[in-house]
Image: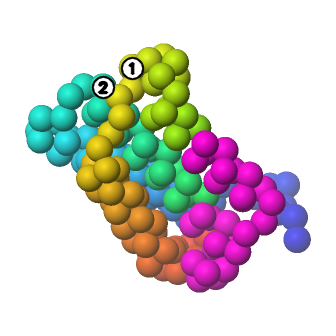
């Protein structure tokens, strides 16, 4: 049913859940960036790695928030919109790496396969962590 006109637009649980998600993606992206910076990654490659980490984090948030009460298998059940978003995001990430005009526009550089694997692993880790935390927030979201 629709919410009552006197009720709050966003519940405290929903705002809290959004903050947890945002802070986790920020922590992963900034943690990876800091670690890669200390590892001596060149600035252009570091910028690219941070961008990829943020985009993959946002894609993870889309997947986590598709269905709140169900397992990850249900959230991955494809539909046309999800497929279009994933294809567009993947295409834009690939273009930022493979099309020199786009890469130079953002001052990006190609990241190595090992750096990309680290970014993907960290992003998947945050997705799994959010999936584990999600059932605990369900009670507060429904209030």
Our reading of the magenta stretch's main secondary structure is: helix
Number of numbered markers? 2
Compared to residue 133, the image places residue 83 above or below, namely: above
Q: Position of residue 130 (x, y in %)?
A: 45, 69
Q: Which residue is mark 2?
A: 44
- Residue visible at 48% across and 22% down in the picture: 100
Disc 2 element: helix
Name the outermost residue toward the right: 1
The magenta segment: 63-91
Compared to residue 82, the image places residue 91 above or below, namely: above
Quadrant housing the C terminus: bottom right
Q: Quadrant of residue 122?
A: bottom left
Compared to residue 125, the image places residue 9 above or below, namely: above
Q: How is the image coloured?
A: rainbow
Say whether residue 23 is visible.
no
Are dots 2 and 1 in contact, CB under 8 Å? yes
- Residue visible at 28% across and 33% down in the picture: 46
- Residue visible at 61% across and 70% down in the picture: 141
Q: Quadrant of residue 34?
A: top left
Say whether residue 42 is visible.
yes
Sequence-first disc among 2 and 1: 2
Q: Position of residue 134 (x, y in %)?
A: 51, 74
Q: Which residue is mark 1?
A: 107
| Mark number displayed over residue 6 | none
Taking depth in this image into account, of 68 and 56 the one nearest to the observer is 56
Q: Position of residue 120 (x, y in %)?
A: 38, 57
Compared to residue 7, the image places residue 143 above or below, namely: below
């Amino acid at each position: 049913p629709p919410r009552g006109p006197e009720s709050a637009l966003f519940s405290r649980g929903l705002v809290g859940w959004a903050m947890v998600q945002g802070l986790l993606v920020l922590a992963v992206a900034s943690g990876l960036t800091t670690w890669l910076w200390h590892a001596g990654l060149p600035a252009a490659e570091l910028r690219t790695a941070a961008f990829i980490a943020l985009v993959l984090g946002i894609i993870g948030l889309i997947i986590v928030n598709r269905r709140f009460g169900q397992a990850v298998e249900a959230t991955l059940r494809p539909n046309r919109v999800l497929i279009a978003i994933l294809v567009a995001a993947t295409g834009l990430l690939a273009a930022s790496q493979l099309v020199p005009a786009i890469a130079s526009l953002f001052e990006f550089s190609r990241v190595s396969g090992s750096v990309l694997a680290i970014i993907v692993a960290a992003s998947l880790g945050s997705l799994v962590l959010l999936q584990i935390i999600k059932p605990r927030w369900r009670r507060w979201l429904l209030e």
